[in-house]
Structures are given as C-alpha cells and as structure tokens.
Image (spheres, rainbow, N blue to C red):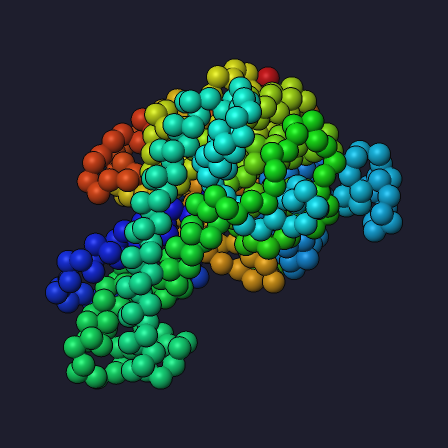
Amino acid sequence: MRNMRILFAASLILSILSLQAQTSLTSVNSNKSEGLKNWHLQNKKSAKAYGANIIELRKALGESKPKKKMVVAIIDSGVDSEHEDLVEVLWTNEGEIPNNNIDDDANGYVDDIHGWNFLVDEQQGDIGHENLEATRVLRLDSVYRKSGVESPEWLDEKMVKLAEEIYQSNEVDYQMMLSFAETFHSLDSIAIAVTGDENYTYSDVFKHKSKEPEFKQTKKIFRIFKFIKLSKGDLEETAIQSETYEKYYLNKSFVTRDEFNYNKKGYGNNDYEGQHAEHGTHVAGIVGANSRNDLGADGTSSGGAEIMLVRTVPDGDEYDLDVVNAIHYATNNGANIINMSFGKGISPHSDEVKRAFMYASNKGVLLIHAAGNDSQDNDVITNYPNGSGLTDVNLITVGALAPHKNKKLVADFSNYGKQSVNIFAPGDEIYSTIPGNEYKFLSGTSMAAPVVSGVAAMIWSYFPDYSAKEIRDVLLNSSGKIDRSVILPGTKKTKVEFSELSSTGGVLDALAAFRLAQEREAE
C-alpha cells in the first residue's frame, strides 16, 4: 500500500503555505522516544495506549516453549533475508537443496529455499516500479479499442469507468504533490544557500540570523513543519513521490508486462528482496523479529513463527495474477498464516483472487489483510483483496490504532467498517526492521495486520491442534471492547463510537486470546 501519510503531508503543507501562516509556534522534538519502540507490545491497561498485551502474555508464559512453530507467509514487497534480526526466523524449504538450479521437491519452483519472488517481467527481469491498476486497465482498454478486437469479458464499461475515476483522483494527488515539490525545492534551495550545507537540519536553519525576507519565511515554515512533526525526510519523500506518480503510477507508456495468462505458473525466481524491500522487511520484522536477542526490534510472535518470503507487491499496484499465485504458493508449501499488507481500489480479476482465498481457507490457512490507509469506510468503498461475497473464509481484516488512549486512538489514516473490518491493532509509529540491518518507525494498516499475524502465530504455536477458524474466533472473541467515542478517521472533529468501526468493536489482546484458547481447550 502506498503510504497515504505522504498525500496528507502534501495537502497540509500546501494549506499552510497558502495561508502564509503568521502564528509563532513552540517547536517540539520530532524524534521518537525510546519508550515508543515497543508500545504495540505493551499492557493495554497500564500503558498510555492500547498495545496488544503481548508483554503480559510473555510474563504469564514464563519459560514455557511453543509446541510447534507456525509458518507465516509475508506476501509483500520483498524482504531482506540476511537481516540480523530475521535470518534466524526464516522458513526453510527442507525439500530443496540450495543453489543447485534443480527443483528438488518438484513443487514447480527452483531453489525456493525461503520462498519465492513473483515480481518479474516476461524476460524474468526484476520489476521494481509499476503502474496503478487503473492505469493498466485504461491502457489495455485503449489497445483493444484501437485494434478493433473484442475486449475480454472483464474489461466492461463499468470496469473502465471505475478505472477512469481512480486515475483522475490520483491525477489530482499528483498535481498536489507537484505543486508541493516545486515549493519545497524553493525552500530547500534557500536553506542550502544560507547554511552552506545541503545536509542541513532544521536546527541548522534556526541558528542563522539572516534578515533576508525569503529566508525568514523559510525559517518560519520550517518551524511549523517541526511542530507538526514533519521531518525533512518526510518533505523530501513527498517531493520524490510526485516523480513516481509521473514516471510510473500514471504513465500509460510505462509497461513491464503484457497481460499474463492466468494459467501461467512457475514464473519468477528466488530474489526475495528486490528493489523496494523496506515495506516487506518492516512487516516481516513486526511478525518475527527475534525477541530473544539484544537487537533492535521485537516480533509479536515471540518465537512462535517462521517467516516465508513471497515477493509480490511492487512500488505501484500489485497484479491479481501474482496475488493468486502467491496465495497458492504459500498454501501449497505449508503456510499456516498469510499476511497481506497491500491493497488497491480496482481488481480486474477479483473473482480469481477470491477463489484463491477460498482455496487457502479450505486448506486450513488463516488469511490476515490490512484494511487500507484512505481514512475511508470499507463498507462503502472497495479495498481489494477482500472477503466481499465470501462466507466461511478464514479472513481477518485489520484497522490501525495510534499510540493514544484518548479520542485520537484510531490512526487518522486507517480505513474502518462495521461489516468489513474485524478488529483494530497497533499500526501507527511501529518500530521494526528495514534492509541493511537497520530499524525504523513506519505507520499504516500495513503495520497493524502483521501485529495480528504475529499474535495469531504465537497463540497457534501453543495450541497447534486448533484449526484456522478456531484461532480466528479466539482472536476476535477475546478482543478488548472500547466503550467510548473517537475521532472518525479523515475528519478533524467528527466523533463516532469506536464500536461502530469494526465488527468486533474491539482491539487485539494477546493475553485475553491465550486465556480464551486455554478455556476452550479445557472444555
């Protein structure tokens, strides 16, 4: 999922600039405190936020060990398989001899030691960037119209209209980012000229006493940025995103693949990392980062998970074909849980994806999906993949909590839905692994889903005889109910009862889930 915080930042910055803000604000430190690193693991009763109560469960378990490690497939952008905090928790395909270029276990994938990479083009070259799905649909529609050949059944008028709406909405986002990028580059140039350092910090700018009107205005705006906790990195990333929209997301001339045949199997390779592995590595760390060492991150599965790497999501929108094959790969190779921290607003082959969901569910797999970062009601909008129209599928859709217990406890970017979102879990400012043995705070429902996946693996590892459906029921039925009103995501003041934002009206509680599993086992 593209981080909607970038769009929010650009919108907010442009609003500030258009107002030519005259208010003098006290700056605050935008660095994350050490105490925030593990807020998602903390006791929800005593902490300042609704953590997942994982630390308390660990205390209750003492020295007891899991009976069986659960395999969690991370269907994502790629993972640094050599990361110091992940290398010991990776799933290993015991039927495959490493690097002999032979499909030893005859599963259709050569040397798939820790998983598979489906992000390749027709020549098996790596795919990094991609179009939006709407862009691909409109391009394909144009091709069929110009050729005079009848378009496929799925490419109907309704599909094309939806693609046009999504494309135009993203075009507006692009124009907003382009305007911001031009403004930021101007401010950046002024700051570099005065400080003499292109690597300047806000503090460096604040130290200078230049009376030049342009610099004084730049200084004032940077103080506002610091106050609202927008780092220089956030600003640079927002400016860079405008180029990404132009070159890749909305560029109908940028083509990495022709339309793949849905019977195509076995394509890809074992390059688990790829070009854009920050997101996937972060997600993998939330689930499985080694909690028994002294390194930076602490996984929510507490040693109960092995991580299967299934690279499927580019910088852009994922292909339905890849999602289908990724789900089948994970299911057929022993995954117990599939974590899906991605999504899009249009899915040409959603029926194929739903069939893959049902296939995995019927094989006893628990599917966990991020609700999306659009501050929207999933009962009204569509965020694919989802369980719409499916019954009896082992699927949990997860919204994101922020590190607050007040009216802002729901992350302002999170999607929600009384029918379509099941539970909320910590997802704002989550500390986890990124490539190169590094660590970082990231936010999104992409971070909330693996919190649930990790806890699911932890519970399941102590009760391995439970079915996926039973684990799902335990997690949802033990969720902590929040009896209060909160700010509705996407608004500044509109309040809604927290219970109206998901089917359970609750937040993930690992300790309560474990106790409920114990009770049910004793019955």
Q: Can you give x and y, in whole percent of width and height, for residue 489 in the image?
A: 30, 38
- Residue pictured at 69% horizontal, 27% vertical: 263
381 is higher (above) or lower (below) than 427 = above
- Residue pictured at 26% horizontal, 57% vertical: 13
Of the 4 image quadrants, the one containing the C terminus is top right
Q: Can you give x and y, in whole percent of width and height, for residue 370 in the image?
A: 47, 36
Choose between 371 and 449: the one closer to the eye: 371
**How many marks on residues?**
0
Residue 5 in view here: yes
Choose between 350 and 307: the one closer to the eye: 350
- Residue pictured at 31% horizontal, 81% vertical: 193
213 is higher (above) or lower (below) than 288 = below
Asked where in the image residue 308 lies, by quadrant, the reply is top right
- Residue pictured at 78% horizontal, 39% vertical: 109
33 is higher (above) or lower (below) than 261 = below
Q: Can you give x and y, in whole percent of width and height, for residue 74 in the image?
A: 61, 41
Residue 385 in view here: no
25 is higher (above) or lower (below) than 362 = below
- In this rendering, would 82 be left or right of 279? right
- In this rendering, would 180 be left or right of 126? left
Q: Can you give x and y, in whole percent of width and height, for residue 437 in the image?
A: 60, 62
**Outermost residue toward the left?**
22
Asked where in the image residue 459 lies, by quadrant, the reply is top right
Choose between 243 and 113: the one closer to the eye: 243
